[in-house]
Image: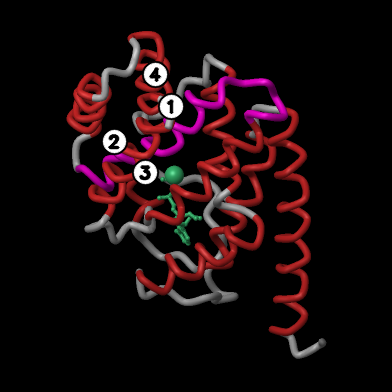
């Protein structure tokens, strides 16, 4: 096993142990899917695979929903990378990616590096397509929200607080967020993957409404 493979394996264990008590929808399989998509996109875009895979594995560790405090989470990752004797160059790259990804204060800064763009695309892809559809209904169910209510209009503007809580339905979340993700993709290959997943969601919504009306 190479040193890089060993670090990846350790990262997997580190993340699994942190995510073990998560109920916010950031389970291990989300991480695993983001990692796989990140590798796919990295290979197509000629990005550094090791930095992409490692960042994908660690991308949710510093999420405020998981650790309560972003800055603390990022420091935890930094010391872990140090213990693993990861080079300064890679540490710097990974920390920059996960800090930008978990940045929640207003408009997020755009991803500066290709590797960051790859990992962010991979994370966004997991919210759309067939997997994205499954996650919406799982999330809504966990929050005790309905799948759909024609009397609740999708919200066009909302604060962070309103986004997290409030009167929402699974179907509205497509309009409030998921159908917009396609336009936020960074890389060419990520865009291509998003196009296909986007079409699949549109077809799903079309069918959903036909069946809702009893017309199909
Ligand atoms: P991220 O941390 O990537 O911004 P979120 O925590 O907002 O993601 O969402 C995690 C998953 O839960 C995503 O698949 C998302 O679509 C889904 N989700 C988030 N908010 C809602 C909501 N209000 N209704 C339904 N699903 C949601
Ligand atoms: Ni994520």
Q: Is mark 3 on a helix, strand or loop?
A: helix
As drawn, the label of residue 26 is none
Q: Residue furthest right?
A: 216
Residue 61 rendering spot, x and y as whole percentages: 30, 39
Q: Ligand 1 sits in which quadrant?
A: bottom left
Against 199, residue 49 (above or below) is: above
| Residue, disc 1 | 2
The residue at the point 28 percent across, 35 percent down is 62
| Residue, disc 4 | 96
* Structural crowding at the residue carrying mark 3, measured as other residues with C-alpha within 10 Å and reported as few (<14), some (14–19) or many (≥20): few
Q: Residue furthest top?
A: 89
Residue situated in front as seen by the camera: 98 or 94: 94
State the CA–CA distance, disc 1 to disc 2: 27 Å
Against 62, residue 170 (above or below) is: below
Q: Is mark 4 on a helix, strand or loop?
A: helix
The quarter of the picture where the C terminus appears is bottom right
Magenta segment, prevailing SS (helix, strand or loop) = helix
Residue 13 rendering spot, x and y as whole percentages: 29, 45
Q: In this view, does 213 lie to the left or right of 136?
A: right
* Residues rendered magenta in the picture: 42-67
Residue 206 rendering spot, x and y as whole percentages: 77, 70
Q: Which residue lies furthest to the front in this view?
A: 1
State the CA–CA distance, disc 1 to disc 4: 24 Å
In the rendered structure, are the residues bearing label 4 and label 3 in contact, judged by CB atoms less than 8 Å apart?
no
Against 211, residue 16 (above or below) is: above
User: By what rule are the colours in the image chosen?
Assistant: secondary structure
The disc, 2 or 4, on the residue closer to the chain's N-terminal end is 2
State the CA–CA distance, disc 3 to disc 2: 18 Å
As drawn, the label of residue 160 is 3
The disc, 4 or 3, on the residue closer to the chain's N-terminal end is 4
């Amino acid at each position: 096993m190479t040193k890089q493979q060993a670090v990846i394996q350790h990262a997997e264990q580190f993340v699994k142990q942190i995510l073990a008590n998560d109920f916010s929808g950031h389970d291990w399989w989300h991480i695993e899917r983001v990692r796989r998509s990140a590798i796919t996109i990295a290979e197509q875009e000629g990005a550094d695979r090791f930095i992409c895979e490692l960042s994908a594995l660690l991308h949710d560790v510093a999420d405020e929903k998981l650790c309560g405090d972003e800055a603390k989470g990022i420091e935890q990752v930094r010391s872990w990378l140090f213990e693993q004797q990861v080079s300064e160059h890679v540490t710097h790259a990974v920390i920059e990616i996960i800090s930008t990804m978990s940045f929640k204060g207003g408009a997020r800064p755009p991803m500066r590096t290709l590797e960051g763009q790859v990992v962010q695309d991979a994370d966004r892809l997991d919210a759309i397509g067939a997997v994205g559809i499954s996650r919406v209904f799982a999330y809504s169910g966990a929050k005790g929200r309905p799948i759909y209510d024609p009397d609740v209009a999708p919200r066009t503007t909302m604060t962070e607080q309103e986004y997290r809580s409030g009167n929402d339905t699974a179907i509205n979340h497509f309009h409030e967020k998921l159908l917009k993700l396609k336009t936020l993709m960074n890389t060419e290959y990520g865009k291509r993957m998003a196009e296909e997943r986007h079409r699949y969601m549109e077809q799903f919504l079309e069918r959903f409404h036909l069946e809702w009306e009893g017309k199909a």
